[in-house]
Amino acid sequence: MSLQTEFDFELPMGYVDKDGNLQKKGTMRLATAMDEISILNDMRVQNNQAYLVIVLLARVITQLGSLTSINTNIIENLFTADLNYLQEFYRQINENGNTKREFICPHCNKPFEVDLSTLGGV
């Protein structure tokens, strides 16, 4: 049995790069303790705690479409829907080690499972 440390995702909206290309599919790795600790030394985070998520996502997203060098500028320019999706995706893989989350149907009250890695493309 091996530990999965990278997870694929698809953004609901997508990032438009400097050449006008839409980048939707990406990969996020599990965060390390150092990832979460070191960002606290970032001056942008010290000046504005809301910036923490921007710096953290820039560290753990390893690929977005054809982009393999992800930085805070890219994360800053994501649409809000994509930023929200990535925050939830981060929480899910780092808390549970997988991309599947259980929900309760509001109509029949039965539980069902959704794979968050495929949610963006719906």
Image (cartoon, helix red, strand yellow):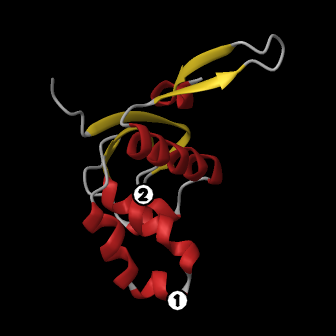
Q: Amino acid at mark 2?
A: Lys
Mark 1 or mark 2, which is nearer the start of the sequence? 2
Does 74 sit left or right of 31 as displayed?
right
Q: Residue at (30%, 47%) from the top-left corner?
A: 30
What's the residue at 24%, 40% (across, down)?
5
Q: Is residue 62 above or below residue 98?
A: below
> Which is more foreground, mark 2 or mark 1?
1
Q: Which percent across, then down, holds residue 74?
A: 43, 61
Looking at the rendered structure, the kind of residue marked 1 is: Asn
What's the mark number on residue 18? 2
- The residue sitting at the right extreme is 107
Q: Which mark is residue 95?
A: none
Q: Using the numbered discs, state the Cα–Cα distance from disc 2 to disc 1 in whole angstroms.
A: 28 Å
Q: Quadrant of residue 12?
A: top right
Q: Nearer the viewer, residue 13 or 99?
A: 99
Q: Tell me which corner region of the image, top left, top right, bottom left or bottom right, holds residue 110.
A: top right
- Does residue 107 sit above or below 39 in this rendering? above
The answer to whether residue 21 shows anywhere in this view is: no
The kind of secondary structure element at disc 2 is loop
Foreground residue among 21 and 82: 82
